[in-house]
Amino acid sequence: MATVDITGEQFASTVEGNDIVLVDFWAEWCGPCKQFGPTYAAVSEKHPDVVFSKVDTEAEQQLAAEAGITSIPTLMAFREKVLVFSQPGALNAQQLEQVVDAVKALDMEEVHAHVARSRAEAAAAANTQDGTQIPEA
């Protein structure tokens, strides 16, 4: 599968509508982004079961800000709607293949259980302040 350009309007539906989504945040003026682009496209051809998407950070500044992008290129990987990898910097083909293989190999039951525990702990922490319970609204 070739890479697909996505916008802020398409981002959520792309992540939610596919099992595995890789997102390359890039810009035209970025030298390392231009080096990484052909590698990203070549690896995408080997994995038709993975969506390889690209976000132009110049055209999609709000999305880049919401995603916390501070350096480009940045690669993110989502599996079953969960962000499971995020790293700035250009990867070579072998490194990108390792990321794809690792994302495919994840035990998603374990990942979802970890996410649920983290959310529960965050909710419990939000309900206490200085050791006292804050009533829920």
Image (spheres, rainbow, N blue to C red):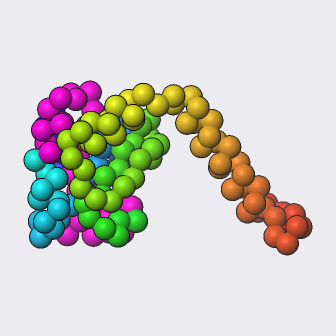
Q: Nearer the viewer, residue 18 or 10?
A: 18
Image position, residue 90 (x, y; %): 23, 55
Image position, residue 82 (x, y; %): 47, 43
Q: How many marks?
A: 0
Query: Which stretch appears magenta?
Result: 39-67
Image position, residue 44 (x, y; %): 18, 36
Is 129 on the left or on the right of 24, as rendered? right
Residue 43 visible in the shown view = yes
| Residue drawn at (14%, 51%) of the image | 37
Image position, residue 24 (x, y; %): 25, 52
**Looking at the image, residue 109 lies above or below residue 29:** above
**Looking at the image, residue 97 lies above or below residue 48:** below
Residue 18 visible in the shown view = no
| Residue drawn at (14%, 32%) of the image | 45
| Residue drawn at (88%, 67%) of the image | 131
Quarter occupied by residue 13: top left
